[in-house]
Amino acid sequence: MAESTPPSSVSVHYEKGKFFRVVHVDGAIGSITPSRNIFVSLYNQRVPLPTLIEQRLSPNGVLGDEIGREGKKGVFREMEMGIVLTPAVARELATFLNEQAKLLDESTRPESSYTTAGKTK
């Protein structure tokens, strides 16, 4: 029997899942899961939207100055999505993000090519 030579490359195809979306991330919060993975919730943050605004009303029905406002005080963090990672994937993602931040720090214009975190084994 002739021995086959392992391939020297592999084609990796990418396709967006039906729930794919782009989200703005201001931060993350998470912890270790009971199954020893890492859970991270990604969030955006902003000031809270008011639940009620009261405005003066002129005799002809035009809205005037704001005279009252109700709502939460402080900062509002909207959890966009949660991700669960193995420790190995978390390390690869951290390396990828650090490499991208370094490229951005060293660059004066955006890169036009995509890079990827993770390795094909």
Image: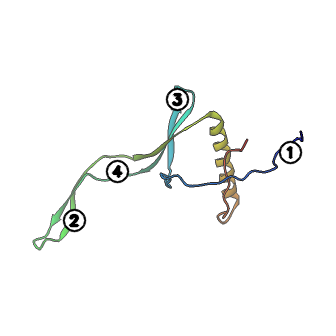
Q: Name the amino acid, label 2.
A: Asp
* Name of the residue lying farthest toward the left: 59
| Quadrant in which the N terminus appears | top right
Q: Is residue 12 above or below residue 33?
A: below
Is 89 positioned to the left or the right of 121 in the image? left
Question: Dividing the picture into quarters, in which one does residue 53 lie?
Answer: bottom left
Residue tagged 4? 48
Tell me whether the residue at label 2 lies in contact with that at label 3, contact meaning CB atoms closer than 8 angstroms.
no
User: How far apart in space, not on screen, are marks 2 and 1 (Cα)?
Assistant: 78 Å
User: How far apart in space, not on screen, are marks 3 and 1 (Cα)?
Assistant: 42 Å
Is 77 positioned to the left or the right of 99 in the image? left
* Name of the residue lying farthest toward the bottom: 60
Which of pointers 1 and 4 lies earlier in the amino acid sequence? 1
Residue tagged 1? 5
Residue tagged 2? 65
Question: Dividing the picture into quarters, in which one does residue 16 lie?
Answer: bottom right
Residue tagged 3? 33
Write the residue at 66% across / 58% down: 114
Q: Name the amino acid, label 4.
A: Pro
